[in-house]
Image: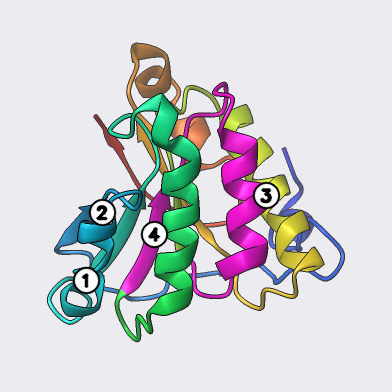
Amino acid sequence: MKTPRAFYQPLAIGAPAPYRELPARLERMIHFVPPHVEKMRAKVPDLISKVDVVLGNLEDAIPADAKEAARAGFIAMGRDNDFGATGLWTRVNCLNSPWFLDDIMEILPAIGEKLDVVMLPKVESPWDIHYLDQLLAQLEAKNGISKPILIHAILETAEGVKNVEAITTASARPISRPRAA
């Protein structure tokens, strides 16, 4: 556990300091987009003004043979659109999948300044948050990202629910409202 003095310090040299308070943003309507489907990506410019969050889904709804296309489609979607006050989120693949690291390592350098939240599925312990927190800080620093990217933890197992308190206090990086799936 970090000391109170160190709790709000950036985790990497050059990374943005964590928010002390969560930015006030509406999240009433989150539209999940399968970014590997061009027809769906083409609807994003119109969606932006109608929803509070556009979320590029890279996880379970995407077939294994379309994971790389979905990641590339999400990056294109981020590059090609001005989201203004609408949030841009992504639900990445879970930590123990073969796609997670590439999701983070490719998305942040490409569109990290536009990305607001990484939704992390299948969170079971505070270590899952520690890992993503440190990785985000390093990539924010390396890529000159000026605002911290938030983490939205999804608890999908009894282990995750059992550890909810430890998960929500695992990081100074605000973890947007964890929810049970």
Is 92 or 158 nearer to us in this picture? 92
Kindly state the secondary structure of the residue where label 1 is placed.
loop
Kindly state the secondary structure of the residue where label 3 is placed.
helix
Q: Which residue is mark 1?
A: 52
Work out how far the residue at label 3 is from the one at label 1, CA to CA, in angstroms.
26 Å
Tell which tag, 3 or 1, sits nearer the viewer: 3
Q: Quadrant of the N terminus?
A: top right
Q: How many marks?
A: 4
Q: Which residues are magenta?
A: 87-116
Q: Which residue is mark 3?
A: 105
Circles 4 and 2 in contact, beta carbons < 8 Å: no
The image shows residue 144, relative to residue 129, as above or below, that is: below
Residue 114's label in the rendered image is none
Work out how far the residue at label 2 is from the one at label 1, CA to CA, in angstroms.
13 Å
Which amino acid type corresponds to the residue marked 3 in the rendered image? Met
Q: Earlier in the sequence, mark 3 or mark 1?
A: 1
Q: Position of residue 51 (x, y in %)?
A: 16, 71
Is 86 or 5 nearer to us in this picture? 86
